[in-house]
Amino acid sequence: MAGGIPIIKAVREGLTANRIEWIAGIINGTTNFILSEMRDKGLAFEAVLAEAQRLGYAEADPTFDIEGVDAAHKATILSAIAFGTPVSFDKAYVEGITRLQSEDIRYAEQLGYRIKLLGLTRRRVVDGRQVGIELRVHPTLIPAKRLIANVEGAMNAVWVKGDAVGHTMYYGKGAGAEPTASSVIADLVDVARMLTADPDHRVPHLAFQAESMAELPILPISEVETAYYLRLRVADEPGVLADITRILADQRISIDAALQREPAEGEAQTDIILLTHRTIEKQVDEAIRSIEALPTVLSRAIRIRLEDLD
């Protein structure tokens, strides 16, 4: 779990006095290395993946890493410990980094953000009532000023927000023989202590006794609320941006920032990049369908979720 970072004990025991509000983590060293190299060197995904394999950061078959599956397993365990829910990997939303393009990393940088593969689980509260748990792994725009946005290479970090302690962050090596050995030995010692402890005073593996597990549902991605980065390849014609903003307004989606690339000489198309305020994903789905139907929109929209992590 996140290399040598003792995050399970931190959440299960160190933060036991807190009601956890959310956990967000860079919890896969391979994908963080790839994204860091793509940003620093401007290389395409395939080229950096080959370098990661050469250096031993990525397996010969890197599917579990680059498709987000490894991070989703870890996020699912953290979610169960934080919120007392059953382990529900099959209900997690999982999206990897294989479709990320170097221009989106560049545009994000221009707008003051960095893209990380983030594992995120959050308690969703509406009008003071808990309605469910968000559990998702996907590429995420994070403000560059956030400490977690500056975790580079194969390093990992987990950011936890509790109601009493506020924000805490745990940082360390996300891969390698010695960090992994450190974590495995700690787990073995923990099991040995559990076997010899008084059964009435054992700390449950998932922090909650079985009879106290919560029945909160894992929310489908369509019900998740977050902000969005949208990139649209459009014809360089008057009125295109007005048509797009009208569709967004119809879905009650407000725009936080916009960037339009100047077309090169002789080009008849350009990129429009929009950052939205927080909204429900299904409304963004509807808006994208309508936008892609416009004759002036020349390709599928690129959508990346955005988290301020306040």
Image (cartoon, helix red, strand yellow):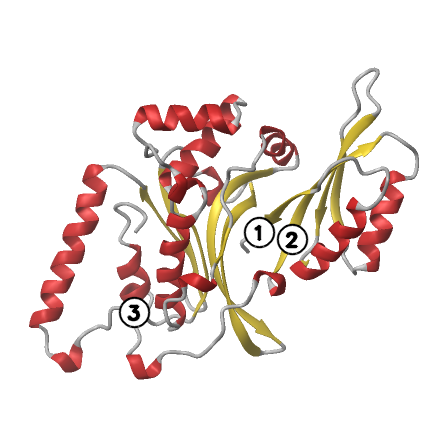
Q: Is residue 221 left or right of residue 211?
A: right
The answer to the question of whether label 3 and label 2 lie on touching residues, with beta carbons closer than 8 A, is no
Residue for badge 3: 206
Amino acid type indicated by mark 3: Leu
Identify the disc placed on residue 307: 1
Residue at coordinates 88% horizontally, 46% vertically from top-left?
243
Q: Is residue 25 left or right of residue 108?
A: left
Residue for badge 2: 227
Q: Earlier in the sequence, mark 3 or mark 1?
A: 3
| 12 over 211 or under it: above or below | above
| Depth check, front residue: 47 or 16 | 47
Residue 296 picture location, percent across and down: 85, 37
| Depth check, front residue: 296 or 128 | 296
Residue 5 picture location, percent across and down: 28, 49
| 188 over 269 or under it: above or below | below
Element at badge 2?
Answer: strand
| 264 over 288 or under it: above or below | above
Nearer mark to the viewer, of 3 and 1: 3
Element at badge 3?
Answer: loop
